[in-house]
Image (spheres, rainbow, N blue to C red):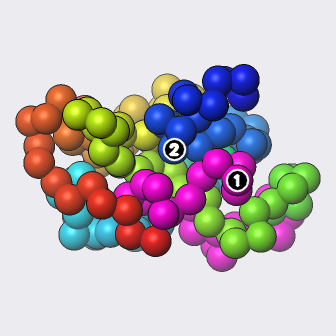
Amino acid sequence: MGTWPEFNRLLGGFFKFHWNDGQLITVKIDEPDHPLNAPFKGQTPLRIIDETYTFARDTYSRHNVRVLTSIDYAAMSAEDKAKEQYPRPDGDYALSWIRPEGKGRVFYEAHGHNEKVYANRPLLAHVLYGMQYVLGDLEVDDRPRP
């Protein structure tokens, strides 16, 4: 992936780091009223145990994607933050986003390494809505909101 810049741009970022599977992540619903976040019904906080991937600052930016969910970095313990060798100075760790691409659409969701994540019905519905968006069955505002 690192040697394929076109794919990194298409996706919206390049892998930088992940916490090990079993890491408790508090998920922030960045846009509770966005149609793709409707399954969460404003539920906060949402806690997930998973191997959560993050993206390099020079490849991921809210200027390029519409962030739907992110890590509530303020809720993370100092011990867990210290596991990351090069943390993002801005503390911006998006977990799901959408973006238009040419005549198509991109939906990204970081979670799903651990099969137990798929037992979370709101998260599973969020992924389904993301697939409907990609297929063009669900029209939503996908303009970036920096």
Asked which quadrant contains residue 32, the reply is: bottom left
Question: Residue, x 18% and y 29% (percent of image)?
Answer: 135
**The disc labelled 1 sits on which kind of residue?**
Asp
Q: Using the image, determine if residue 82 lies above or below residue 6.
A: below
Viewer-side residue, 15 vs 51: 15
Of callouts 1 and 2, the N-terminal one: 2
Indicate whether 29 appears above or below 102: below
Classify residue 14 as left or right of residue 17. Answer: left
Q: Can residue 15 be seen from the camera position used here?
A: yes
Q: Which mark is residue 68?
A: none
Q: Nearer the viewer, residue 138 or 99?
A: 99
Element carrying mark 1: loop
Secondary structure beneath disc 2? loop
Give the quadrant of residue 46.
bottom left
In the image, is residue 68 part of the stretch drawn in magenta?
Answer: yes
Say the numbered circle drawn on residue 12: 2
**Mark 1–mark 2 contact, CB under 8 Å?**
no
Viewer-proximal residue among 64 and 19: 64
Q: Position of residue 117 (x, y in %)?
A: 46, 37
Residue at (51, 44) in percent of width and height: 12
- The answer to whether 31 appears left or right of 24 in the picture is left
The percent position of residue 69, horizontal first and vertical second, equals: 43, 59
Extreme residue in the bottom direction: 74
- Is residue 26 among the parts visible in the rendering? no
Specify start and end residues of the magenta stretch as a single range: 56-80
Q: Is residue 74 magenta?
A: yes
* Identity of the residue drawn at 20% across and 59% down: 141
User: Residue shown at 65%/39% (left/top)?
Assistant: 14
Q: Amino acid at mark 2?
A: Gly
Residue 40: x percent and y percent?
28, 58
From the viewer's perspective, is residue 143 above or below residue 124? below
Name the residue tied to disc 1.
58
